[in-house]
Each structure stands twice: as structure tokens, then as C-alpha cells.
Image: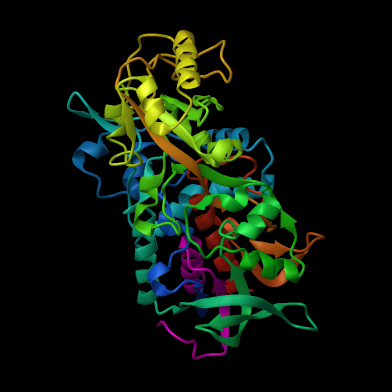
Amino acid sequence: MTGRSSQSKYDVIIIGGGNTALLTALQANEAGAKVLVLEKAPKQYRGGNGYFTTGIYRIVHNGIEDVKDLIPDLTDEERNLDIPAYSADDFFRDYMRITEDMPDPELTEVLISESTEAIRWMVKKQGLKMELTGLGLSRVDGRLVYNFNMPIQSKGGGAGLSDALYSKIEEKGIELLYDASATKLLVDDVSGRVCGVRVRNKGEMQEIKCKAAILACGGFESNPQWRAQYLGKGWDMVKVRGTRYNMGDGLRMALEIGAQPTGNWSGCHAIFIDADAPQPAIREDTEKTSRRTYNLGIIVNIDGKRFVDEGEDEIVFTYARFGQTVISQPQRIAFQVFDSKIQPILKTLSDYSGAPYTAGDTIEELADKLGIDPECFKQTVKEYNDASKPGGTLDPTRMAGLLQGENRQAQGILPLKSNWAYPMDKPPFYAYPVCCGITFTFGGIKINKRAQVLDNYDNPIPGLYASGEIVGGFFYNNYPGATGLCSGVVFGRIAGANAATD
């Protein structure tokens, strides 16, 4: 049922309409609760940030056997793939290394230990479809080869998952209101329990009662005022990759009733995107504007100077942090530059295939077309080439085209290039203009392992739960790729089950 709410009381009200919110609703419904979902956006823009994602999940798995269990409709060729296993220790090591050992240890243990079962629940209990992610999957000498430890993604990516979830919500008769913006959490004066939500429903204010509420409505990345306040100078001018509706309303409502702020409030997930990416982001085209294979080239600013180590680590461990490096550059713009050895690889990737670029037969010609300092750019490329190692074979079977061999480092230049350093010497040369695109914010409210929202003294706020990007304590300074969707389903299930029986 969709439209205006016809009842005044529910067991659980879920604030949010993204993938985490809908999975939370399905779990609460499975636990026997009468559920209402409030989606702030109108129907044509539903789905939150989840709609914009690639739909990849970082989970613990034992390789092809687990993959076959979660994707039963693999082709015969895919069922014979050798897929590297990814253990709980691998997950923990990667997660903590990238986030500087700062995430909440209790929540981290739950996230990792429940990751596989969460996806299995989506597939086996909810009938949602998964597919093999294309990253690391290629054909070499006629043979399908796979080199990636995150093989599972939602069928059709984030958009496919979002559409499938909304169909499940309707199929199960869960009530859903579009264009319904929660403005206040109602709290019982005597017990202090959250007992309802004040809602602006298609412009009309109403109060809807409930036994428990779940906040699953994202962070504040779409709010330029909050971005400048919490992230710092220049952040009000960055582009938003996802939904325009994540204005921090859920955070504001929770903080107003005493929820504890936690996590990295000055941090966020921000990547390089097409400098001409439209605003608001076009839902179907967001991934096409991403520019995440910078490790195979160099990045220069408008002065023609490099400013970041493009090969610092694997892309999944740098892409969410590198976007912010361009904010401090002149005019907040940069250029990813490649030569003709790399261009054929880029054309096979979704984030470069068909992307606008500028080409030049010489570095000077490319500089002139880009409007950057030609002499400085030429000197930058010369110094980089002199420091690089010639030779080596590009291996397209590895994620993002990793080079065969180890320790290909360009030394004696600043910044150095730690990996994938080889001369940029085969014309023509290609440049992709990029800017910073913010995806979601890291700061949020504190929860315990039951997904209960905690007050400033670590006491649960009765009747209030949270899941997804609104929760702080998971990510600090950086983000291990594909962890957010997994966190959303793990703690969405926990929140839904516990709220239903609260």
C-alpha cells in the first residue's frame, strides 16, 4: 500500500527509503511487526544513496563454493572459476588498516561475523538476486579469469537492488509513504521512550504513533551548510554523487533528543568524478561519471603539477579518500592523464567507457587544449618518466589492470608513485578533467550491537534504533570499498528484528 497513512499506530516506523531502510523493513516485517516506511523523496527519486551504488558487498567467503551458493544461476564457465577466498582475518586486516584501527571494535566484530549470513538472508529468505561483479573478471586467451576478493554484487547494481526491494515491500503489504519527510521524533514525557514521528506528508503535518522507530536515512552530504561546518573550507562547493535528499534530518532529530554523536564528523567518502558531472546527480548515470583508474596514469592540477601518489595502494583502498585531495588545488579541478598504452584498457571500464576526454599528440598540445601551464606539465611528465621503470606487461585480469611484477615505484620525485609506475611515453596522450564528488559522510550517531541508539552516557534511548550511513563509528579518514552496503544489511537486520520485539 502506498499513499497517505490511514492508521495512527504502528509497531515500527522506519525513516528512510534507501536499501538499508527497506531491508530493515523486511526484517521487521518478518519478525511480525506492523511497519510503516517513510521515504522523504517523491516516488520518481526514491531509493536513497543505495540506488546510485555498484551494489558490491565486502563479505567473508570461502571462494567459488560460497559464490555458487549465493549466485545459483552462474553459467557453467563461471562455476569453474578460481575465486580467491576472503577470510574474517582478511576482512579485519583490510578494514582496520584502511581506517587506522579506529572503528568501534564491538560493531566491527558484528559486521564481519554476520556479513555472509546477511547476504544469504537476502538471497534465501527475501528472494533477492546476486550476480558476479565484473571487477577482476576478464577473458584471457579465451579463458575466463577472475582476480578479485569481492565477487558478489546485487543483480543490476544498486538500481536493480532498489527496484527489487520496493517490489518486495509492495508484495508483502508493508505500508509506504512517499514525499513524507520526518521532522521530529516524538518522546513520551514520562517514560522517555520514542513513541512516534512528526511527518510532513505531501506538505501536510501529521503525527504518527509507533512502539519503536528506526533511523535509516543517511548522513548530511547533501547539505552544503553542514558540509562547510563539519568537513571544512571548500566542501560547500563540491558535487554530490548520490541522492539530494540526505540533508542530515535524521541526525538532527536524534541529536535533539539526546543521541550521542560519534565517529569521524570531519570525514567522508569522496571520489574523483567528471568535472562536468551534472547536479543534482542523474540517477542512471552516476557510476558513469566516476573516475577510479587513476593508478594507471598520473594526476596533475591546472599548473601541470602532480599532487598525490596515484599508486599508493589498490584502488578500493584509496578511491574514497583521493577525491578530497582536489579541493585544495587551484580552481578545485585536476586532470587524470594517460598515454596510448592505457587508453584501450580504459575503454573497457564502465567509469571511462564513453567518458569525455581531451587528446593531444604531444604533452604541449594536450596542455594547450586543457589550458594548463605547458612548460610545467612537460617538466612534470619528464621527471615522472625519468623516475619510472620501463618495460613490464599490463595484466588486464587483475582489478584495474594491475601491472605484473612487484615494487614498480617511481622514486626521486614528489610525490613519489608507489606502484604502477612506468613511463608515459606513447602518444597520443589523453586527459580526463575531474573534481571532487562526495558520496556520504562518516560522522553519525552511536549505536550498540543491538542497533539501539545510545545517549551521551551510553544508555539506550528507549524505542530508537538506527542502521546505515546515519550510524557513526564505522569509517575514519578512509573507506574500504564495498563495506557500506554490507554494514547496512547487517545492522538493518539487527535493528529490524530488535525493534519489532521492543
Using the image as rendered, state which of residue 131 and residue 306 is in the foreground: 306
- The count of marks equals 0
- The image quadrant where one finds the N terminus is bottom left
Q: Position of residue 313 (x, y in %)?
A: 52, 27
- Asked whether residue 399 is in view, the answer is no
Q: Residue at x 34, y 58 (%)?
A: 160
In the visual, does 88 lie left or right of 390?
right
Report the residue that reaches farthest toward the left. Answer: 142
x, y percentage for residue 250?
Answer: 63, 67
Is residue 203 visible in the rendered structure shown here? yes
458 magenta-colored = no
In the image, 3: left or right of 225? left
Q: Considering depth in this image, is 228 or 369 the residue closer to the camera?
A: 369
* Above-or-below relation of 456 to 307: below
Residue in the picture at 52% in, 71% down:
28
Q: Answer with the quarter of the image where residue 183 lies.
A: bottom right
235 or 166: nearer the viewer: 235
Q: Is residue 462 above or below residue 362?
A: below
Picture quadrant where residue 190 is located? bottom right
Q: Residue at x 49, y 73 (%)?
A: 39
The image quadrant where one finds the C terminus is: bottom right
In the rendered image of this protein, does residue 281 appear above or below residue 69? below
In this picture, residue 137 sits left or right of residue 364: left
In the picture as drawn, the residue positioned furthest to the right comes out as 457
Q: Name the spot of residue 213 as percent of width and height, x first.
A: 61, 73
The residue under the point 38% across, 8% down is 390
Q: Is residue 466 above or below residue 236?
A: below
> Which residue range is magenta in the image?
1-30
**Is 27 covered by the magenta stretch?**
yes
Coloring applied to the structure = rainbow
> How far across and down, in percent of the image, does residue 229 sit?
70, 54
